């Protein structure tokens, strides 16, 4: 597949060099003591008073030698393991929204652990999704169980890879305990760590925080899967220039990558971003804007230069409804990113600039994902697929409808959506003139009304609940 490029090879090299200049001359404000100590040991200049770390180019270039070209998302069920970029596009839900669009009332409200359980089951069954990044927070989490109240219902109801983060080290340790209980032992979990961790330790511009950085260091030291996302916002936390935002974000990726490779050379990483351009009429966040897709495409060029997997939060929307705006923002940005070579898409289910999950939107995004996967497969050129003998057999004026070749290929050549309509208007009218959101919600209800095949066994659930007293129920149940 030939990838789209905004930059020439010389321009890509110049962005890399400019990123090195920023790291060496401007530096990064590092708030985490352990990170500063690690940077100091590998030859960076550390100003103890200001917290500024400056990176000689040779330090970054040494770290680059250990970059690896793949990243694996491990699942509870090995059949759902996914490897970037080989299995791409890998489609992931958007994550950590505080709210949900209530499927009964259509009103936005705070999300709960029960919502997470239902979403986990839905994502387990929707064919377009490969990874469940826990879509919402849990308002009903008991004190001291903020993160476990999210991971437990997610893992209980979804056998695909589960991904999220934690706000502090105590919560991270709880989540790892949960993983070990599910696996049967610490050794079994370390052999197949099916909880996938993600943080945003880089805070644009050129700043590294405390808690997220602490978690990344801990997980890398343990050999557990973790990666970070870079999030510059042009006009607010980066210059109002797409090229400058790519350059600043690239410098931040290199700073984080240098930390990771200094701890464990060869640790898998993803060049993941959510680079955006602020709407300066209001200062509003605009992750659905076309510039988000363009920036992802630019960052993917840099990732290809470094030979690491790429992607991120691409395919989001600013719309508060699963409507035309939501569809074109998700569709245009994910298509652009795919054509540039991105292989990870955090795109599923969220409305309103990552603020609310909607079941209909998740179903919609699964269909968009199936189209992206088909596009990635391409034309599959071969002499056999030219079908010259078949064309000669049918001849001028013939029909391919009754040919065995058509029957054999019809389900693999074309995407056959379940929700999008292809009926003539008269048939559509006779079936109730339903809009897409209505049909998407019907599909969600159809899936969630069935028995959940991914649910924990009673024995495992009893063991987990005995270990974590007062834990939320975590059961998927659809009341529509």
Image (cartoon, rainbow, N blue to C red):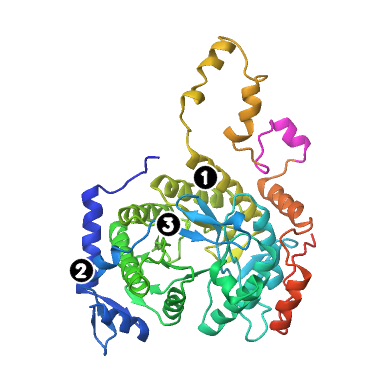
Check whether the beta carbons of the residues at disc 1 and disc 2 lie within 8 A of each other: no
Q: Which residue is mark 1?
A: 372
Q: CA distance from mark 1 to mark 3?
A: 20 Å
Q: Is residue 422 magenta?
A: yes
Pinpoint residue 435: horizontal percent, then vertical percent: 68, 45
- Tell which residue pokes out farthest to the top in this image: 396
Q: Is residue 425 above or below residue 245?
A: above
Name the residue that disc number 3 marks. Answer: 70
Q: Indicate the position of residue 323 as horizontal and vertical percent values.
A: 60, 51
In the shown orientation, is residue 83 left or right of residue 410? left
Main secondary-structure element of the magenta-colored stretch: loop
Q: Earlier in the sequence, mark 1 or mark 2?
A: 2
At a point 72% along the width and 71% down the height, the residue shown is: 474
For the magenta stretch, what is the residue range? 418-432
Foreground residue among 290 and 125: 125
Q: What is the secondary structure assignment of the residue under circle 1? A: helix
Q: Residue 246 falls in which quadrant of the image?
A: bottom left
Q: Which residue is mark 2?
A: 58
Residue 148 seen in the current view: yes
Report if the CB atoms under discs 1 and 3 are less than 8 Å apart.
no
Would residue 461 be found to the left or right of residue 328 on screen?
Answer: right
Q: How far apart are labels 3 and 2 at the CA level?
A: 24 Å
């Amino acid at each position: 597949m030939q990838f789209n490029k905004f930059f020439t090879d010389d321009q890509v090299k110049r962005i890399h060099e400019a990123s090195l200049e920023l790291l060496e001359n401007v530096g990064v404000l590092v708030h985490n003591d352990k990170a500063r100590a690690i940077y100091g040991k590998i030859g960076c200049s550390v100003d103890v008073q200001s917290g500024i770390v400056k990176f000689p180019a040779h330090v970054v270039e040494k770290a680059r030698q250990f970059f690896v070209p793949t990243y694996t998302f491990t699942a509870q069920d090995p059949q759902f393991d996914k490897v970037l970029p080989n299995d791409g596009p890998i489609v992931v839900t958007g994550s950590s929204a505080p709210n949900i669009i209530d499927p009964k009332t259509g009103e936005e409200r705070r999300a709960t652990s029960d919502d997470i359980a239902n979403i986990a089951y839905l994502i387990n069954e929707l064919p377009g999704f490969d990874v469940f990044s826990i879509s919402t927070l849990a308002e009903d989490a008991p004190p001291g169980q903020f993160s476990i109240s999210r991971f437990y219902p997610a893992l209980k109801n979804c056998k695909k890879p589960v991904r999220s983060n934690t706000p502090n080290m105590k919560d991270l340790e709880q989540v790892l305990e949960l993983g070990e209980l599910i696996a049967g032992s610490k050794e079994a979990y370390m052999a197949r760590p099916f909880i996938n961790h993600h943080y945003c330790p880089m805070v644009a511009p050129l700043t590294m925080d405390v808690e997220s950085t602490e978690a990344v260091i801990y997980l890398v030291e343990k050999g557990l899967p973790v990666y970070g996302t870079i999030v510059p916002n042009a006009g607010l936390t980066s210059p109002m220039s797409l090229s400058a935002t790519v350059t600043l974000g690239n410098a931040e990726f290199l700073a984080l990558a240098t930390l990771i490779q200094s701890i464990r050379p060869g640790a898998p990483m993803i060049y993941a971003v959510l680079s955006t351009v602020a709407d300066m009429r209001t200062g509003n966040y605009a992750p659905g804007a076309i510039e988000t897709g363009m920036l992802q495409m630019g960052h993917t060029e840099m990732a290809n230069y470094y030979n690491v997997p790429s992607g991120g939060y691409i395919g989001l929307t600013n719309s508060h409804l699963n409507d035309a705006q939501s569809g074109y923002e998700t569709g245009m940005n994910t298509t652009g990113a795919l054509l540039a070579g991105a292989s990870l898409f955090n795109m599923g289910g969220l409305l309103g600039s990552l603020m609310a999950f909607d079941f209909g939107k998740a179903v919609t995004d699964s269909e968009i994902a199936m189209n992206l996967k088909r596009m990635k497969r391409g034309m599959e050129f071969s002499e056999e697929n030219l079908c010259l003998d078949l064309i000669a057999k049918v001849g001028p004026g013939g029909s391919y409808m009754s040919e065995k070749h058509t029957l054999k290929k019809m389900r693999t050549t074309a995407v056959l959506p379940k929700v999008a309509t292809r009926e003539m208007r008269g048939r559509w009218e006779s079936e109730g003139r339903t809009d897409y959101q209505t049909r998407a919600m019907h599909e969600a209800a159809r899936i969630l009304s069935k028995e959940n095949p991914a649910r924990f066994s009673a024995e495992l659930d009893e063991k987990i609940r005995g270990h974590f007293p007062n834990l939320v129920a975590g059961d998927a149940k659809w009341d529509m």
